[in-house]
Each structure stands twice: as C-alpha cells, then as structure tokens.
Amino acid sequence: MSKVSPWEFSEMGLRLGGVSGISELMDDLGHALVTGGDRVKMLGGGQPAIIPSIDQRWRERLEEMQKNSEELIRAVSLYDPPRGNPEFLSALAALLRRELGWQISAENLAITAGGQTAFFFLFHLLAGVMPDGRQKKILLPLVPEYIGYANQSVRGDLFRAYRPRVEVTGPHEFKYRVDFDALQITEDIAAICVSRPTNPTGNVLTDEEMTRLSMLASTHNIPLIVDNAYGAPFPNIIFTDVQPVWNEQMILTLSLSKLGLPGTRTGIVIASPEIAAAVANMSAIVGLANPNLGQAIVKPMIESGEILRMSREVIKPFYLEKSRFAIDCVLETFGNRFEYYVHRSEGALFLWLWFPGLPITSKLLYERLKKRGVLIISGHYFFFGLDEGDDWKHRDECLRMTFTMSEEVVREGIKLIAEEVSFAMDESKSA
Amino acid sequence: MSKVSPWEFSEMGLRLGGVSGISELMDDLGHALVTGGDRVKMLGGGQPAIIPSIDQRWRERLEEMQKNSEELIRAVSLYDPPRGNPEFLSALAALLRRELGWQISAENLAITAGGQTAFFFLFHLLAGVMPDGRQKKILLPLVPEYIGYANQSVRGDLFRAYRPRVEVTGPHEFKYRVDFDALQITEDIAAICVSRPTNPTGNVLTDEEMTRLSMLASTHNIPLIVDNAYGAPFPNIIFTDVQPVWNEQMILTLSLSKLGLPGTRTGIVIASPEIAAAVANMSAIVGLANPNLGQAIVKPMIESGEILRMSREVIKPFYLEKSRFAIDCVLETFGNRFEYYVHRSEGALFLWLWFPGLPITSKLLYERLKKRGVLIISGHYFFFGLDEGDDWKHRDECLRMTFTMSEEVVREGIKLIAEEVSFAMDESKSA
C-alpha cells in the first residue's frame, strides 16, 4: 500500500494531536497495566490501588446489577441524556443536600466522560477568545498544578500561573502556599482554578486560603473552579481536617475514578444551573452522550450514603497508610546522602519530592529511572502558565511518585530513585 | 443562596455550550428512554432496537465476563492507554486484515469515547485555522448530513456543503446523488466527509460515487473521511450490495453503538498511523483515557469473527424488515392524501420523508407532532454548510423518523404524521 504524504494539521490539531506530558504518562501507565508490569516499578500514573474490600464491593455490585435487575444491560444498551442519568443526578443532589447542606438540585449537575473532559469544557467555556476578540485566561494561583490541564488549550496561552511561596516545615518536609501578595486578578482573568487535594503535590489548600480565593472570585465576579477529584465527600483521600464547600460562585468537580472506577470515565460538575446546562450541551455536541456504567454502579450507594462510609472508613485510611509508608521509606532510604524535601502529604495518591541543587534536570532523571525500570513523572510538566522568562530552577528539581502500588514496588522504586539522585549529585561533585 | 450574575462565555463556549439540534434531540431521546415513554412515540433518536437474540448475547457475555474471568472488574477499575486497549486493537486489526484484506495493524487504529467524539477530533485536527492563519473547511459533497456534525465548530464555519441532485426513483420514492458537476475542491478544503449509510436519509452512496470521491481526495491529497457507524463490517445495517473499502487516503470510523452498545460510548478510527496517533493524543489531552467496557465486551467476538455473523445474520435482516414495515405503513397510511416521497431506504435506522410544497416548516411540523406525543427530527437541521443565501425550499420540507421501535409505535406515529401533514396542507388550501 502506498503511503500518503502527511496531511497538514490545523493549529488546534497541532496542539491537541501532538505528544504531550499527559499522553506520554497515560501511555506509560496503560501499557504497564496491560502488560502486567512485573518488571516495571510503575510510580508514574494516577491508577488507584485495588483495595481488597472496595474491589470486593464493586464485584458484588456488578453481580447484583446483572442478577437482580436490568441495570447492567440497561447501562450498555441505552443512551442517557447528555447531562447524565436523571435518577443518578437526583440521587447525588439529594446526598449533597442531606450530608453537606448544599442548596442544589439536578439542575446544578452535569456528567462528563471523566473529570479531565470536564476541565476541557470548563476552561474553553469561560476562557480563550471572547466574542469581541478579547483573550481571557484561567488563573492558577499556585503551580505545580495538574499536568492534564497543561496542553488543553486549543489556541494561545490559556493559563496565567504564579509561583507559590515555599515553606520548609520540617527537616525534610515543605509545603507550598498561595502567594497572595503576588496574585493579580486582571480584567482578562476568566476564572481561578485549583485542584484540592492538589495533583501532583498532595497539598491541600487551607480553609483560609480557600476563603481568600473565594472572596477574590466574588469581588471580581468570576468563578472559582475546584478540581475535587481526590476530595470530599468522595473519594475523600484527604488527610487534613478541612471543610467541603460549594456555592454558586464555585464550580466543583468530582470523579468516580479514585473510588476505583477509572475505566468507567465518569466526571461530575457541580455549578450554577447556567454552567451545568452549558456543560451538558457541550457533552451533546462533542460526545453525544456519556458512558453510563459508572453512574449505574454507584447510584444505589449514593442513595444509601454507603459511598460516604466507604470513602471515610476504607479509602481514606488505606491511602493515609500508603502515604506514611512511602514517606518512612523515603526518610530511611534517602538518609543524608543528599539534600531533599518531601511535600507535606495531605491527600491524593502522590509524593512530591524536591531535590534542591539537583545537577541534572528532572526530565533526565526520569529518563535514567525509566532505563532502570522505574516510572515516575518529571516535575517540570506541572509548572505551566508561568512567564516564559521565568527561570526558576525549582521547576527542574522535583518529581512526582505515586504511592499506591505494593510496598515492595514502592520500596524498590524509592531505592532506585535514591541511587540515581545520589549518582547525579556525585557526578557533579567529581566534575 | 444568592444567585451569581451570569458569567461571560467565550466564543467557543457560546458555540458548544448553547442549545443545538443534537442537544435537543439527545435530551428528548434520553428522557423518553429513562421515563419509559409509553405515552411518547419516540421516532426521533438513534437509539438502536433491543433485538432479542442480540440482547441475549450481550447478557451472556456480561455474565461470562463476571464469572469466568477478571474481565468485568478489570474494565471498570483500570485505565487503558489513550489509544485504546492494546489487545482489542490487535484483535480488530487482525479481523480487518483477515476478512477484508486491509493492510493494517494496531498502529492504524484509535478508540474514542463514541463515534461523535471521533468527528470532533478529526474535523479539528485537519480543518479550522491553520498555523499560518489560513482557514480550512470540511467538504460535505451532499447534504442532508448527520446533525451531530453541525455544531461541532469551535470557531467560524467548518463546513462547505453542496445540494444533492434529487432523483425521483418511484411513485413515492427518491434518492439523493452527489452532484459531481457542482463540487469544487478548492485550496481551502481540508478533507471530504460523508456518512455511509447516511444518517439521516438511509442513503448509501454507490461504489461509483465512492470511487469518484476517493479519486478527488487522492488528486488533491486530502483525506476522505467516511462515517461508517451503520456500515460494514459491523453493524452492517446496509441493505444494498456494496464493497467496504479502506486505504491510507481514507479515514474510516466504526462504532459499537448500533450493535446495541451505545451506553458504552465506543468509537473506532481507522486511518494512517499519523492520524491514528494524533487521535490517541487528542484522547489523552481531552479525556485522559477512553471507556473500557465496550472494547472488553466485544473483544472475544472480534477474535472469533462472531461479530460479523451477528451483524450479517441477525442485525441486518432485523433492520431491513423494520425498514420495509415502516415503508409499507407509510404507503398505506399516506395514500394519496398529499404529495410525498420517501428516500430509498438503503441502510441505517431512519426513513427520510419529503413533503413537496409543505406549507409549514418542518420545524413547526415537529412542534405540532411533539404536542401530539410523536417525536421526530425536523429535516432542516441536517442541511448545514450551504451558502447563507441558499433559500432551497426543500430544506424545510423533510423529516427524519426512526423505524426501530415496536410496530405499534411506528404505525401510530406514521398515522399522526399523516394527520398533521394533511391538516397543514388543508389549512393552506382553505386560507
């Protein structure tokens, strides 16, 4: 068969169709999972752990859906409305009213094919080129922020990001803080966006930080978008005592992925009725309808409140223990061989490691580790939206490692990270 | 709770976030399906029929996935790579090589969250604003074309469409033909696109028409995109004897929806390795990964070839009979009460009715029918991409009705269509 000459891609095509941090990551992850990955220490992805009692619960639920009712066949064989399954939306609204006192109905909700798609929709709904030609941006009060946002722009720069204040909070611990003195909400800012708990750092913005961001949003009449994929009320992978909050000035997203259902691609947007309706319309145009299965699986557990108990009593403690194990392992393994800090682990599935003075880039460190069978994510991907001239060295000194895998894989991965960082440090000393 | 003042939407937000033909349709459809819809004659959507033996097969397969293996839990609890499940892609490539002789491997394939998303990606990959500022468009050699494309542009006009030649082929039958004398492939055309069988008309472009389009594409080195959601090798809802064809100049899409699995949202792109890779990257950026379930359900049936037998021996005959029943019903019910033509039914799930001289718009006819409990789609939505000045009256004289529902619903719907058209015709005579 003769090869066609390559066709031109559009500007949007070049942006979305090229290789990106997130496409590399998902490719690494997917292939490691599919091929088994005994030889690969996969500390790179956001794949949630298989938690035995949760896994068992999904199995029971799938069996129930098949045996006792038409639920399973219905989920595969019928289209739901683009906004999501009406019964699921009602059940979720009732849960949020009952448990958290939020004044919402199904009109405030819209389902998307995963949380990431919700952000593609929300960013482009509000920012980019306006009807009169002005350009608007999403303000990220603090980077590092989620790698999955970085390449979502269809045109021009979509983000304006700020460096955080870096606060050393222990011998080998630090925490990022929003630098409120630096933030400027100019006319061209369409919305403020944060993930909380933050992917990649495990940071949880404090209630005070959230209140200040909320006030800024309110003062400028722009939405505060909060990516709550790891947060409360589910999956509740949040280790600090903070308050879940929603109001009409906010757009909050939830996901079923970190409950253990990433393969179902189920994201949830909680917003004003206008925003929720717009997201539903975007789902219709871009994807016709959403995948049904995730909603069908959890619906009765939303109705009964079981999903909150699972999150609080099983999922959160499970990951808290994983986090503590990984930190202990880092402290023990890294010792005093080189300078390092771990971001305070307040939620999500990751440790964020900072090696001040690392003589190689984190990208090179990633490549060296990959050769040794350890997959992590180079930290530089998460620092997007800063001024082009920003030469903050910190950006090349960090990495994200996932702590959800078996203790053996985590321990072995950390050992190899220590070896490679040590080697890089020594290399530079002897040069 | 105080209401926030509405936030500004971007140009893209206004385009994708507004109410569209497809959002209205999917909303009508989804709610009719969810609420049962005994009182609603739902002839509006693309919901495939529940075919008893096919439905039974999906039930068995779901049971098997649960009992004999880890397939079902794996499909919900693990991320696949953005391109799709590697084993599924290999199995599909092998089937297409074996059965159709196409020279392809997994490198030529990419999964999307439904066929419609594939078109959102493909159109914007190739057309729209180019890196140097030129604007490119998708050429539709013939409208009416699929309503789901109409609102997918994020910016400017995405389509250049041509009126077809209208050929009356029987006392109450007609067929659209590509008007090759009119087609102009100018420098700003990025690709040619057709659905075959065509949604909404049930038209199947002839092998000769396809060859001529393929040659035009080749001469101008642009891709020919073929939306094969209803076509061969599966679901094979195609009543004429035509040849499935693919080559590297083509981009062909398939879907699992019309096999009876629309709730899984599974689209398939078959293209050159460069295009398939770009689609996979777009999936990563826009949606992180795809829903797994549809691929997991059909994988062994792709391996064994069962999916082809199901399509050929059950699905195609089922819809052929449905089509014939609906046409007979139309002929019998409409009689000689008014002038009408049915598009020759060569595939897909719809009859396309044309009422020459209809004194009200098809949009008004839709509204009157909706009041009487019959949902159809007004034909005007399907005529997009024509010159703004085009005042072709034909555009307001057609409707699409789905023939997949029970005989009783189809019969009753057709009866009410006849009454409303009759009433409109008489109204105009007596005025």
Image: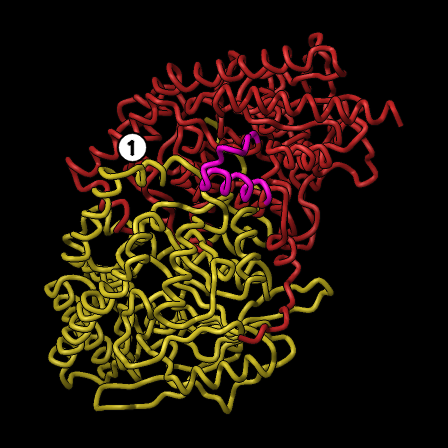
Chain colours: A yellow, B red
In the rendered image, residue B221, in percent from the top left (x then y), is placed at: 61, 34
The image quadrant that residue B414 belongs to is: top right
Q: Is residue A391 left or right of residue B152?
A: left
Q: Position of residue B99 (x, y in %)?
A: 36, 19
Task: Name the image quarter holding residue A124.
Answer: bottom right
Q: Can residue B193 be seen in this snapshot? A: no
Classify mark 1: helix, strand or loop. Answer: helix
Amino acid type of the residue tagged 1 in the rendering: Lys
Reply yes or no: does residue B87 show up in magenta.
no
In the rendered structure, the answer to whether residue B426 lies left or right of residue A187 reads right
Quadrant assignment for the N terminus of chain A: top left
Identify the residue shown where x is 20% and y is 73%.
A320
Residues packed near mark 1 inside 10 Å, few (<14), some (14 to 19) or many (20 plus): some
Q: Residue at x 38, y 38 (%)?
A: B107
- Residue A197 position in % (x across, y down): 34, 73
Residue B68 visible in the picture: yes
Q: Nearer the viewer, residue B143 or A229?
A: A229
| Residue A91 found in image quarter | bottom left
Quadrant of image for the C terminus of chain A: bottom left
Q: Which residue is mark 1?
A: B299
